Amino acid sequence: MDFSQTIVAISTAPGVGAIGIVRMSGSDALAIIKLIFRTEAESTAKFELKSHQSRHGFILADSEIIDEVVVTAFLSPNSYTGEDVVEISCHGNPLIARRILSACLEKGARCAEPGEFTQRAFLNGKIDLTQAEAVLDLIQAKTEQGSQGALSILKGDLGKEVKVIREQLKDLLTNIVASIDFPNEVEQLSNDKIETVVEQSLTRLKALAKTARSGKYIREGLKLAIVGRPNAGKSSLLNCLLKVERAIVTDMPGTTRDSLEEQFDINGIPVVLVDTAGMRNTDDHIEKLGIERTKQVLSDSQLVLLVGDLTCGWQEEETKILTAIENKPWILLWNKSDLMPKQGGNKPDLDQCLAKTADANGSHPNRALACLSISAKTGHGIEELAKQIEDWVFVGGKPQEVGASLNTRQAALCEKAMEALQLMKKTLSYGMPHDCLATDLKTTLDSLSEITGVAVSEEVITAVFANFCIGK
Ligand code: GDP
């Protein structure tokens, strides 16, 4: 990719809209706009565009007016990319936007690659790599929580935190290296002092690493499975959560035949919800298919809701289902509390239920995260269920509060940095010479630099920006 060229792209979504925006960035952006734009009063030659000012006028191609537009200039370095940027707001017909794009191309601009505007902003030092990734998160956020979290990273909170940790460790490395190279001039740091800095950095990195879990759910959606005996109320719960009649509800056990995938939002968490067929042994072919899928869904899911029927209590079926849940995190829901208001308030005790599934040692390794009584019919307990899911997802804190929700790339680097710091702690505990510390400290610093993009390979940059849309 040649970053010296001026790029152009349609920045608005394809399709008809009120307005369309064609965006240009690069050293020739102003010269190109001068060739194709004129206001009513001025000729193109005389035309002047000041930074952060909009002008009304017309885009021309071969002396023919293509559209009536508003052109806004953002001059270098005070623009998104750091280069001269011109935005042409036209009428929202894709044909018009495409003709304006062609006019810019004809005068020397080239088509922007996906994410190239943001990539230029990164390469020109306007934003760090975490902020560039947050731009993508913001565009793709599925819920308000997602967009709020992305915004806080876009403000630079994550980058700042990583920088603070890196600076502290950089000082430590400088000290260690100086005391090795100039033992007579620079006093060697005590092991206690080094350990304190390492511990402080580890604590801060651990707090960041914790946000990776919720970051994943917020970006990709939490895969939630609903399982339970036939007629326990799984479809009704799904409907209750969706607040629309989507799944088939009947009185006949085993009639929820298909795994219905739904996407919605629980307290700001995008959820991919799968309503599964009842998990009971049956010879019915179609139902068997449903059961196979149930097992598949369980293996794919990240959180399981086991719906029990309060009027039946914990039976062998629930034990079987729990066995299939294996080690997945799960919540036990006692449904139909409206039918048994007394028991609803006094639901079967989780320990008693689990005692029935206990292994030879009398313990069940996978305790439920919570045991709630609900009514899919009246909505009782649904708010509490949503709260439980929210608390479980945001165990490391909400992104907008902690200023981070690490993505997979950042989380892997954070882990690498922490591993190297743990090795340093070991080295210190063995009383080894300080030059042994330098390698691990450098690994930590490299990983932290890669998170923010201070030092990052072209390959990583290409991978980060490959997911962007054209025009951003
Ligand atoms: P599934 O087979 O587990 O999907 O169960 P359904 O959602 O199809 O529900 C089975 C039956 O139980 C239907 O007649 C529902 O109306 C009823 N039902 C489900 N949840 C409740 C509830 O909370 N209270 C009452 N009274 N009935 C419920």
Image (cartoon, rainbow, N blue to C red):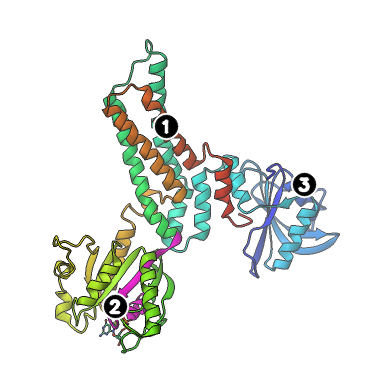
> On screen, 45 above or below 258?
above
Q: Residue furthest top?
A: 184
- Which residues fall within the magenta stretch? 220-241
What type is the residue that disc 1 sits on? Answer: Glu
C-alpha gap between disc 1 and disc 2: 52 Å
> On screen, 31 above or below 449?
below
Which of the numbered marks, if any, corresponds to residue 221? none
Q: Is mark 3 within 8 Å of ligand 1?
A: no
- Image position, residue 402 (x, y; %): 36, 49
What type is the residue that disc 3 sits on? Answer: Ala
Dot 1 falls on a residue whose secondary structure is: helix
Question: Within 10 angstroms of label 1, few (less than 14), some, or many (20 or more) residues?
Answer: few
Q: Nearer the viewer, residue 35 or 416?
A: 416
Q: Earlier in the sequence, mark 2 or mark 3?
A: 3
Dot 2 falls on a residue whose secondary structure is: loop
- Image position, residue 289 (x, y; %): 40, 79
Residue 339: image quadrant is bottom left
Residue mark closest to the camera, 3 vs 1:
1
- Image position, residue 1 (x, y; %): 68, 45
In the image, what residue occupies the spot 30% across and 59% down? Answer: 392
Residue 214: image quadrant is bottom left
170 sits left or right of 359 in the view: right
In the image, what residue occupies the spot 21% across and 68% down? Answer: 371
Q: Which residue is mark 1?
A: 167
Q: Which residue is mark 3?
A: 31
Q: Which residue is mark 2?
A: 379
Q: Are marks 2 and 3 in contact (CB under 8 Å)?
A: no
Q: Residue furthest right?
A: 63
What type is the residue that disc 2 sits on? Answer: Gly
Q: Earlier in the sequence, mark 1 or mark 2?
A: 1
